[in-house]
Image (tube, rainbow, N blue to C red):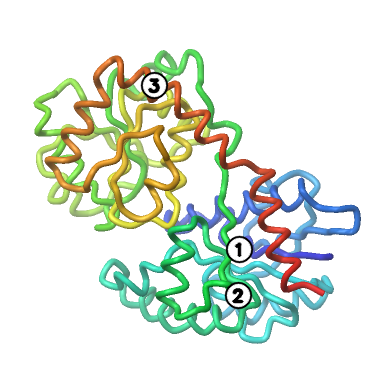
Amino acid sequence: MRVAVDCHMVGARRSGDAGNARYAASLVAALASGRAVDDDVWALVAHPAAVQALPAGVPHAGVTPRNVPRLLRGAPAALGRLHAQAAVFTYVAPPRPRTSVALAVHDASFMTHPEWLGPRARQVLRRLVPAGARRAGVVLALSGWAADETAEALRLPPGRVRVVSPFADPVFRPRPGAPGRVAARFGLDGYCLAVGDLGPRKNLGVLAEALGRLGRRDLPLALVGRAARGAGQVLGGANVRWLGRVSDEDLADLYSAAAVTAFPSLHEGFGLPALEALACGSPLVVSDRGALPEVVGEAALVAAPTADALADALRAALEPATADRLRGAGPGRAAHYSERAMGEAAWAALREVGP
């Protein structure tokens, strides 16, 4: 069975593509490692940098989707040339793709919380995703919680949605010597790490408020992500270090060396940064929203996404005994999500729609 995976976002420089790109690259790796003798996996790429981000030896075909309309026009021709028997697209699929389609929908916040999106993204997603999901042979969700939400929001029969969860890249693991490297690279020694942007769903303003309630000026908030206008207004007078974009190796060191990592999002279909933090053995605090409690299990502290509740959870996670327990539990929990498990789930879903 020949399968093609839409990887047009892999290698893109826009920060909003990062989560989709990680999932697509992980899916290609999982499909490639779990394929049978007669299976074949291709990646549809749009940026030269994508080739280096994908597993070695996976063939690729080019599409040039600078925007959604070009993707919809270019992908069917590429699929036809490949004689693909099934294809995976993320959120938006061509209406006439020339093959069976599995549509990956990471979460349905574009339906449940459209106010979090800009006007164009809101219009595109709310118009194209439900139609694409109805045409698709199967819809891929990243967690059980997201599968239920997607089926309800898009009015799909639950049997049309399959769970194909991602895994943490092997670079994310406990890293001996990480505190020294973080101190040398970033000048940090003792900090709360957060990964994300200043969009309202990430809830970082409330996290900054929660840290302020600890009264710990020696515990800065280290933010990995692109700085944005209005950051001062969102984060108030918090002691913040903007780290910008970092390599996966640096990010793994930052997780490993952090006094605590916080992921207080208001809505997540999975929450890959939480899984990466667990894999690195970082004491972790997450919100009780979306799929986060499902993903972290008992290996993190779960709190309501309010300043008071997050402050209590952060305070608890910083206690030495609790921090040690969380550091020990995280990697084992992260191993529950593996390349093998993702590949098996993905192939099972694709064989439902393939020939």
Q: Please name the residue shown 58% across and 73% down the image.
A: 160
Classify residue 341 as left or right of residue 301.
right
Q: Please name the residue shown 85% across and 53% down the image.
A: 36
Q: How far apart are the alpha carbons under marks 3 and 1?
A: 33 Å
User: Residue beneath label 3, please?
Assistant: 257
Label 3 secondary element: helix
Q: Which mark is residue 8?
A: 1
Label 1 secondary element: loop
Classify residue 158 as left or right of residue 288.
right
For the residues bearing labels 1 and 2, Cβ distance under 8 angstroms? yes
Sequence-first tag of 1 and 2: 1
For the residues bearing labels 3 and 1, Cβ distance under 8 angstroms? no
Amino acid type indicated by mark 2: Leu
**Which circle, 3 or 1, is nearer the viewer?**
3
Q: Is residue 76 above or below residue 44?
A: below
Q: Which mark is residue 71?
A: 2
Classify residue 218 as left or right of residue 280.
left
Amino acid type indicated by mark 3: Ala
Residue 165 x, y percent position in the rendering: 56, 52
Amino acid type indicated by mark 1: His
